[in-house]
Image: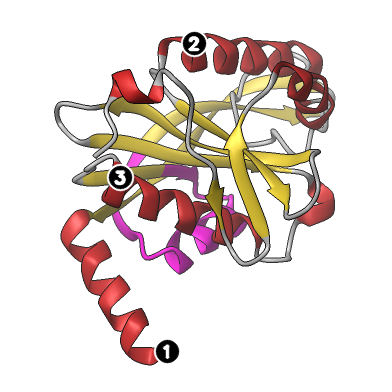
Amino acid sequence: MLTRKMLGQGLPVLWTDRLLLRSLRQSDFSTLSELFSDPQVIQYVNRGGQPTPIRARRLLNQIRSSSSKLDSLHYGICWKGREQIIGITSFQHWNEHSGTAQIGYILNRSCWGMGVATEAVQRLLHFGFTELNLQKVEARCYEANVSSERVLRKSGMSYERTLPSFGWSQEDGQTQDTLLDVKVYALYREEHVRLQKDKSLQT
């Protein structure tokens, strides 16, 4: 099992059929800055009434800070054989003692609809349950974010509850508070093990 102290020396590289997941480098942050500047990409991330550039900078700073303290584990997503990242997937609010974390991802719009998010999320979940000894992983997405909800279901996560949350919307050029529903999905270690067994029997 990997401990926080061990991960302080660097995150292990993870592979899938098409992707490479690796730790973030200093040179990646300019790419992330461009990625977060796309309003559609961060539509459901760091929601607030502030303009996209400000939200993007805030998100970038959060990633830098949480990465250095290992409060969150951020992986850059790359195509195999290519160095440039096309997104990130992360364990946030990682609690080593309770074995819990929240999973999330952000992906370049050019890669939407290609199964990349599902492939990356499934790989990170497997890493969390097998190498970090996680017992439960949660994910949260706004009810309107049907694409992310589909990714979570394909990754084996199940709906648990809905939380009311204030967000912001634009109407007639004006920003206003809006009550938005946030769906909470979860996957438990036992269920992940069962899903992996079922998958191996099918191959």
Q: Earlier in the sequence, mark 1 or mark 3?
A: 3
- Residue 165 appears at what percent x and percent y? 43, 30
Region rendered in magenta: 140-163
User: Residue visible at 23% across and 42% down?
Assistant: 134
Question: What's the mark number on residue 68?
Answer: 2
* Residue count near mark 2 (Cα–Cα under 10 Å), binned few <14, some 14–19, many ≥20: few
Question: What's the mark number on residue 203?
Answer: 1
- Residue 161 appears at what percent x and percent y? 28, 49
- Check the picture and name the quadrant holding the C terminus: bottom left
- Whole-angstrom CA distance, mark 1 to mark 3, is 23 Å
Secondary structure at numbered mark 2: helix
- Please tell me which residue lies in front, 86 or 24: 24
Type of amino acid at the residue the image marks with label 2: Ser
Q: Quadrant of residue 201?
A: bottom left
- Whole-angstrom CA distance, mark 2 to mark 3, is 20 Å
User: Residue visible at 20% across and 55% down?
Assistant: 189
Is 68 situated left or right of 41 in this image? left
Type of amino acid at the residue the image marks with label 1: Thr
User: Residue visible at 69% across and 35% down?
Assistant: 43
Q: Which residue is mark 3?
A: 131
- Please tell me which residue lies in front, 96 or 104: 96
